[in-house]
Image: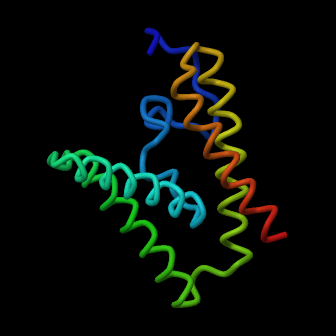
Amino acid sequence: LPSPLPPIPEGVNLEDVKDPDNISNYISMMLLDTKLNYWRNQVKKISSVGNRIPDKIKEKMSALTKNEAAIKAQIEAGRLTEEKYMDYLNRQVNKDKLLLKYLEGIGQFKRAEIVKERIQIISSEISMAG
């Protein structure tokens, strides 16, 4: 990242700029499902050649699985209504649009790609629900 960083837009935090793939941005069931499938396939590839699964991958999968279980539990307990869930998704997309513009503006195109993919997946989930 460039130093010093230009001012970060309101609604975006430094953690997102440093690591746009941090677990707090995984609030979409479709996104969680997409990422879990991706990591399951990576594990299969690594295992198929007899290699050990890196701890980093295990930790990522564990965090994604916990987020998915937490969201499902909130829905089942009635604490997370469809309306609230859609609101969370819309807020995430709005935040990600600001983050995407910021990352592109400071030349962080690899990080921006992570955000762009997340916007596409969550926007797709929103349009399927509407």
At a point 20% along the width and 45% down the height, the residue shown is: 54
In the rendered image, residue 51, in percent from the top left (x then y), is placed at 16, 45
Placement of the C terminus among the 4 image quadrants? bottom right
At a point 36% along the width and 49% down the height, the residue shown is: 42
In the rendered image, residue 12, in percent from the top left (x then y), is placed at 58, 37
At a point 42% along the width and 66% down the height, the residue shown is: 67
Q: How is the image coloured?
A: rainbow
Q: Is residue 122 left or right of residue 42?
A: right
Placement of the N terminus among the 4 image quadrants? top left
Q: Is residue 4 above or below residue 88?
A: above
In the rendered image, residue 57, in percent from the top left (x then y), is placed at 28, 48
Q: Quadrant of residue 88 in the image? A: bottom right
Q: Is residue 110 above or below residue 56?
A: above
Residue at the far bottom in the pictured view:
77
Q: Is residue 36 left or right of residue 85?
A: left
Q: Is residue 112 above or below residue 95?
A: above
Q: Is residue 99 left or right of residue 53?
A: right
Residue at the far right in the pictured view:
130
